[in-house]
Amino acid sequence: MKVRIKFAKQGAMKFIGHLDVMRYFQKALRRADIDIAFSEGMSPHMIMSFAAPLGVGLTSDGEYVDIEIKTPITTAEALEKLNKVMADGMTILDFRQIEEGKASKAMSLVAAADYTVKFRKGCEPVGKKNPEDGPAGKMDWQSDISGFFARKSIVITKQTKKGESEVDIRPMIYQMSVNAGVVSMQLATGSVANLKPELVMEAYAKFKGFELPEFALEVNRREVYADLGQNGKRRLVSLNDLGTILA
Amino acid sequence: MRKLALSDEILLSVEKPARYIGNEVNSVMKTLTYVPGENSLENQDEKQYLENTQKKNRIRLAMCFPDVYEIGMSHLGIQILYDLFNKREDTWCERVYSPWVDLDKVMREQQLPLFALESQDPIKDFDFLGITIQYEMCYTNILQILELSQIPLFASERGEECPLVIGGGPCTYNPEPLADFFDLFYIGEGETVYDDLLDLYKACKTSGCSRAEFLHQAAKIPGIYVPSLYEVTYLEDGTIKAFTPKQKDIPAKIAKQVVTDVTHASYPDAPVVPFIKVTQDRVVLEIQRGCIRGCRFCQAGMVYRPNRERDLEVLKEHAKNMLKNTGHEEISLSSLSSSDYSDLEGMVTYLMEEFHDKNINISLPSLRIDAFSLDVMSKVQDVRKSSLTFAPEAGSQRLRDVINKGLTEEIILNGAGEAFEGGWNKVKLYFMLGLPTETEEDRKEIAHLANAIAVRYYEIPKDQRNGKCQITVSTSFLVPKPFTPFQWASMHEPGDYLGFAKTVNHEIREMLNQKSIKYNWHQADVTVLEGFLARGDRKAGKVILEAYRRGALFDAWTEFWNYDRWLEAFEATDTDLYFYTRRERKEDEIFPWDFIDIGVTKQFLLKEWNKAKAGEITKNCRAGCSGCGAMKYEGGVCFEGKN
């Protein structure tokens, strides 16, 4: 039986890289005594696949891992068993059955993700030393988000292996708004098109004319979606909603 | 959410930030401070009084392994003590490891105090900083830990508010090179008198007695060594004239602590599970302590006497619990010589039956190669990928008798032959060079033995064997250690050592099957320095400090090792390296470590030293008692079959 686990990765857990999160889950599933299926062969490994790797330093409320289990278990029971063995900051949010077959695999379904981005304390943009810009050292960096999002194209220069290339990231920004210092955005994610929220903020900083130092942003992934739309029309459904609760 | 000691900016700019955040599964969080509102007392003064009392009644202890997190987290001893201390309600034991060089730099620049992983609080606010000292090449890292913690390096310069710095582990069987940097040492196995020490500390704290008074009282607990309470005087030639307590009520000898009943000793059923891959990423089950063999170069074989086994049924229980609580996918048996465990078959059969179907790997290090072990290994590992390991330690039978390694060429060839017929084709061979009485011929015999093993392989008909065989020969150089029969032996020059290795290499290249033999040898200059630190006296401390001041750190890591820096330190401190390394010690010389009583007598070691030089072997403990002195602990192999 194929199962999708939704989990949150918060607090200090943001410093644990993707490969270590995989290792973490392998051990956590054993601790929780979930009867997970293994691959065949000389060195069997747990059948487990993650939706979209999250970078080190980012938190998330919408991470997904698909596994295969041999003994059925209810969603409620699995949540209890798993949350009992979690490290602080890791929370299992859901545990749902998904369809069999490769097409339902989280990794290949991922099409978009929601993010919230804010500035780390003390890292808020500092404006030009012009008193008309408001209090010294502060600037109203939020005012042009809608103007930025309203643009037809946002061309950035990307560093690639071959050198520099120009990319229009605007088509990959599905939504963008700001409220009380928190920028919300919905971005293309996955193997077809992928845009990182940090890159959007870099482009915005350039557009607005402020410096964006390294590590200035706090990024939280809110949700990851599959695109069930047809004929080029987007219809985003969260990966969780593709599963059914095990009762 | 818990607050971290380091900012996100720092953590995101260093390698592997997970080394510094704590929060691992099974790490212990405790609240030892007074929480307002939890107590119904209205009276403020009384509240204050309670708070103070509570403060006095709690002990905060940081356990340190002075190397990088991945190495430190792989150490069983700390896991045992961590569990032991945290079972006490009044104590919170946390962990700390050496910050890697990238973070080291940042902490120095920003003057950030080193912190414990669990609470993220500065070490300098703790009651104890316990440091396990597992190998000589970590000595400069100990100074790094102290300095980054903002604790004065010299014990004599520490004030009342400083944590008490306590050392333990194998290197403390000669603690003298580190004597100036530690307030106290715990000699022997931690399970015995730590409770007494902590109880004493608590009593002292409550009654408000001074650091000096506490140390004075602590020095009376068996196994506790307070270096500042002893005076060393020297003869004109630099050797020790006398080692004496400064006060009458301080014991002249420190008694090594031994757990008589290892079966019922505390063992961690829920070890901490690191997020990042550490060296020992598995459950480690210690099946026994000590070794019956008595190899003459081996310090562990002497200081952990007598050999004591854990009961099989208790081990089964531990194995089950540890796997359940950690979720590890591998279990490894730990001991100095697993094949000597009386019911190894029962242990291994249990592990295979219970866990093999659950896709849990079983790892069996230090097994003697025989029909049984080959059968077991073929069941738990992929024969084609794994290799067999033999440690003959010396090339010729004569020299193997000198070191009392009871392994003959016949045993090795038979074992290898059986293994080859069972499908193996990779063999690792470990040897030592620079052994007492060793000759050019002995060195060449290493090549001959490797060749003989290859010949044995190619005796198998071509259609029945698995391609070519791969024999890897590795040599290290002998470091004479305190409390071994070789503690009297002289060492060689780095250049000599490399010459020995060259002889081996040259002879291997002369062999018919040389294409099947690969040869690796250890660094020679590191060996010399290890030798200096292993048998150093109190005067060695200033060399360590000087080398550290000149930038020596992570000396155990090839990429940071710098011999010249150490040579400069010898010169700057006017210390003669040769005094420590290039001298065969006289039989009646007083050694810096003689004040420690490990049970095994100096008289026995001397007898062994003389037997070594005569090429005479000594029986293992099970074959017959040689009267080493360890029987006084009234346990283990000394009493097997006697009750």
Image (cartoon, rainbow, N blue to C red):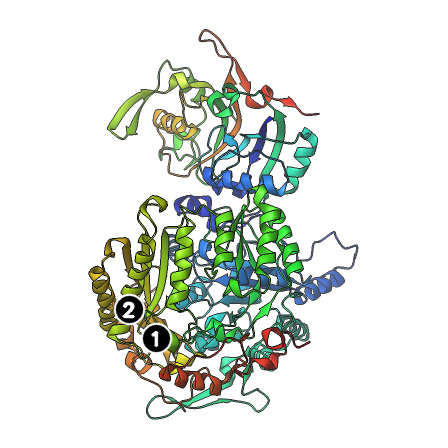
Q: Is residue B435 visible?
A: yes
Q: Position of residue A24 (x, y in %)?
A: 53, 41
Q: Nearer the viewer, residue A95 or B520?
A: B520
Structural crowding at the residue carrying mark 1, measured as other residues with C-alpha within 10 Å and reported as few (<14), some (14–19) or many (≥20): many
Q: Could you say which quadrant of the image residue B239 lies in?
A: bottom left
Quarter that holds the N terminus of chain B: top right
Asked if the residue under mark 2 is in contact with the one under mark 1, i.e. CB atoms within 8 Å, the reply is yes
Q: Amino acid at mark 1?
A: Leu
Disc ID at residue B399? 1
Q: Position of residue B140 (x, y in %)?
A: 38, 67
Disc 2 target residue: B445
Q: Could you say which quadrant of the image residue B265 lies in?
A: bottom right
Structural crowding at the residue carrying mark 2, measured as other residues with C-alpha within 10 Å and reported as few (<14), some (14–19) or many (≥20): some
Q: Is residue B537 visible?
A: no
Q: Earlier along the polypeptide chain: callout 1 or callout 2?
A: 1
Q: Residue furthest front?
A: B461
Quarter that holds the C terminus of chain B: bottom right
Q: Nearer the viewer, residue B264 or B571?
A: B264
Q: Nearer the viewer, residue B437 or A76?
A: B437
**Residue A120 sits above or below residue B635 on the image:** above
Q: Amino acid at mark 2?
A: Glu
Measure the C-alpha gap from mark 1 to mark 2: 10 Å
Q: Residue at x 58, y 49 (%)?
A: B352
Q: Residue at x 78, y 59 (%)?
A: B43
**Residue B623 sits above or below residue B448 on the image:** below
